[in-house]
Image: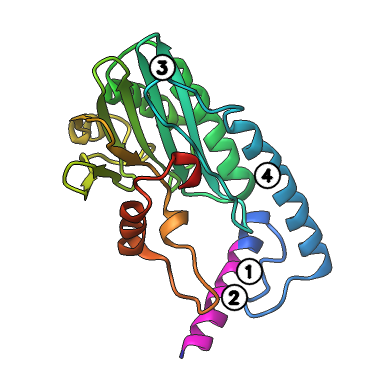
Amino acid sequence: PTSVSLLRLKAQKRLALRQRMGLLKHKSGDEDLSEVERKMLDHELAIAEELQANLLPRKVPQIPGYDVSAYYRPSREVGGDYYDFIEIDADHLGILVADVSGKGIPGSIVMTETRALVKSEAVRTLSPAETLMRVNKVLYNDIKRGMFVTVYYLILSLEKSVVNCVSAGHNPMVLWRKASNTCHLVNPNGLALGIDKGPLFDKTLKEQKIQLFKGDRFVLYTDGVIESMNSKQEQFGQNRFYLRTKQLADKSSSEY
């Protein structure tokens, strides 16, 4: 049953690729990709990889009293994962992780616009919810229906060690408390960007403030982490990820 499921999944992926590239739609998903299709796919992936690489920040901010690091590893089929650090002012740092529903060039293009909109709006307000509301109003009109962007965005007050979090349908932030050696999920309510043009999105989106204490750690990620598989086709999963966060919590972020 497992091998049959894997074959079916591969067939579905081949069919989805053909539909996205507009190639040979009369073929079924069971047929292997032709040489022309493989070359076009390789070309698309190369462009998408370059677009995505240009989105990521060139450096991670070095802030006295804080240990900040980032890790990015693309999958074989390029998606729309993205993270960023936004220096709002001398005391406030915006940290964002996002994931576009689309793959390849379409996903990269949507993420490019999302990045530009967030960077433009973030410096105008210290409310992460207000930033995403403004971004959603523009993005909704620009992207194809059925596509959406999940975002976890927080603003860290460096002086007060307070994070103000908002989630547009993204994976919850994992917060480890050093004093109790416990992990907690910070998951404020919210819809993904691009699903609703405004009223429902604005009403649903909620902010949540968290006071950090010395030694605490928080982790943002995309579903590529928990959906990664080993050689036995077993997903890493949320529980293993939370446990791993707890096991490595006392190490530096670069070792995480």
User: What residue is pinned by disc 3?
Assistant: 121
Measured in 3D between alpha carbons, the distance from the residue under mark 4 to the one under mark 3, in whole angstroms, is: 26 Å
Q: From the viewer's side, name the closer residue of 84 and 204.
A: 84
User: What residue is pinned by disc 2?
Assistant: 11
Between marks 1 and 4 in the image, the one whose residue lies nearer the viewer: 4
First reached walking from the N terminus: tag 3 or tag 2? 2
Q: Looking at the picture, which amino acid does disc 2 mark?
A: Ala
Residues marked 3 and 2 touching at CB (< 8 Å) = no
Tell me the magenta residue range. Answer: 2-16
Q: Looking at the picture, which amino acid does disc 3 mark?
A: Glu
The label on residue 55 is: none
* Residue located 26% across and 30% down the image: 214
Q: From the viewer's side, name the closer residue of 176 and 130.
A: 176
In the rendered image, which quarter is residue 205 located in?
Answer: top left
Asked if residue 108 is among those painted magenta in the image, a careful observer would answer no
Residue 33 spot, x, y in % from top left? 73, 71
First reached walking from the N terminus: tag 4 or tag 3? 4
Badge 1: residue crowd in 10 Å (few <14, some 14–19, many ≥20) = many
What secondary structure is found at the residue carrying circle 3? helix
User: What residue is pinned by disc 4?
Assistant: 49
* Residue located 55% across and 76% down the image: 231
Between marks 3 and 1 in the image, the one whose residue lies nearer the viewer: 3
User: What residue is pinned by disc 1?
Assistant: 14
First reached walking from the N terminus: tag 4 or tag 2? 2
First reached walking from the N terminus: tag 3 or tag 1? 1
